[in-house]
Structures are given as C-alpha cells and as structure tokens.
Image (cartoon, helix red, strand yellow):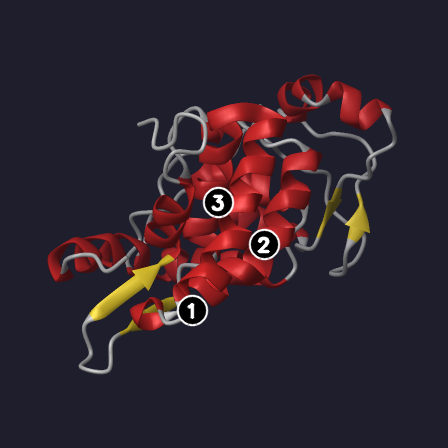
Amino acid sequence: MRSSRGECERAWCVVRGSAFFTNRDCRLRLAPPRAHSTTALKMPARGMHETKAQHAPDLAAGVEVATALSPAEHATLCGPTDSYETSRKQRQIVGKIARNPMWSDVLLVLQKTAPPPSSGGAAYTPAVHQQLLALMHPLVTRIHDVGDANLARTVTPVRVAGIAIHDLGGVDAMRAVYDALRVLLQNERSFTPSGEPWSEASHALDHAWYGVGAWPAA
C-alpha cells in the first residue's frame, strides 16, 4: 500500500495548495437558503437546469435538494480563485461540506475542482451520494492503517463500497466519488513511525478498488 515519498508529496502538494480550486465558475447555482442551517432548496437558480435535467428521475421521486452552506459561502465557493485568501476560504468551506456532506454541496465541489466527466455531475446521483456517505468513515480507517496492520478488516468495506458504486453508475460514478473524496478528505493523511508518508484518500481508494470494473480507468 505504501507509495513512494516523492509520489505522495506531489499528490499532497496539490491538495494542500490551491490547485484544487480553479477559476471555473460553478454551473450549479443553488437557490440561497433562508438561514445558515441545512435548508431544502426552493426553485433552481440559473444554471441549475442542467443538473436538474440529469437527475430528473431522482427529483421527481421527491429527493430533497438541500445545502449546508450560507449564500455567502455558495458565492465564495462558486467564484474565482483569485487570491490566497480566497483559496483559504474555499478550503474552509470544503471542510464544512466534509463535516456534513449534502448531495448538492458535493456537486458544487465536483464542478469546482474535478476534471470531466466528474465535473459534469451526471454520474453523481443521490444514490451514489449515499454510497459516498457510507464510505467516508471506512476510508478514513483504511488511510490510517499504517503498515497494513489490519489489511483485511480495513480494505474490505472500501472495496465493497466501490463495487456498490460501480453497480449504480459504472466507472464514471466511481470516478465522481473518488474526485469528491480526495478533496473532502484532503486533511486525512497517515505517516509511518519514521515520518514517511504512508497513505491518503486517493491512494487508499486506488488500492482497494483495483480491478473493480475497469478501475483504474484513466
């Protein structure tokens, strides 16, 4: 499971810096909540029609589109990354999303940070989101299994989740979850007793999901 020091450091440099946060505007613009708490969204704002059309069956079934972010936080996350201070605020907002991940908020993260096809959001359905929620705790446990001391116990639930996600949406759904978790869990890293990097989200997922469907696809 251990990756080379250079490989891990390069990956973590991207996470720790502002590289995840591009000047791409979010195409999904959510109606502002009335308070700074979790709120169901009313009418979709401009740009929401794309994602609404992609997930029409889910929305028709009564799935509640909710957000944990304030209007100001939406504006900051969706706006350009034009300074270190903005990048810092965007990382803080992503941390808030990670503590209470809502489907619509994770879609915003994907649209802001992920490459295509994940950034389009089509594969990240509410059902796939439920799998991400179930996967987060086992993945953190797997990341911190330094030396693979509990390999069978920690890798199995992560792999089972990958299979379930693949059953829902194939490799595109797996890629969307992968791209979301490498940002949401950017602060989850483990080290060997000597201080060498051991694992983080993308490495743990690549290891556990190898051979599920066509993973790794690209």
Query: Image quadrant of residue 84?
Result: bottom left
Determine which of the numbered discs, if any, sits on residue 73 in the image. 2
Instruction: Tell me the crowding category of disc 1: few under 14, some 14 to 19, or many 20 or more residues within 10 angstroms, Cα based.
Output: few
Outermost residue, front side = 152
Q: Amino acid at mark 1?
A: Asn
- Which of discs 3 and 2 lies nearer the camera? The answer is 3
For the residues labelled 3 and 2, the Cα–Cα distance comes to 18 Å
In primary-sequence order, the first of circles 3 and 1 is 1
Q: Which residue in the protein does label 1 denote?
A: 150
Outermost residue, right side = 62
Q: Amino acid at mark 3?
A: Ala
Picture layout, residue 19 above or below residue 187: above
Q: Position of residue 66 (x, y in %)?
A: 75, 45
Determine which of the numbered discs, if any, sits on residue 193 in the image. none
Q: Position of residue 166 (x, y in %)?
A: 54, 30
Instruction: Evaluate whether residue 79 shows in this view.
Output: no
Picture layout, residue 54 above or below residue 7: above
On screen, residue 43 versus residue 150, left or right, reads right
Mark 1 element type: loop
Q: Which residue in the protein does label 3 denote?
A: 180
Looking at this view, is 166 or 184 the one in front? 166
- Which of discs 3 and 1 lies nearer the camera? The answer is 1
Instruction: Evaluate whether residue 6 shows in this view.
Output: yes
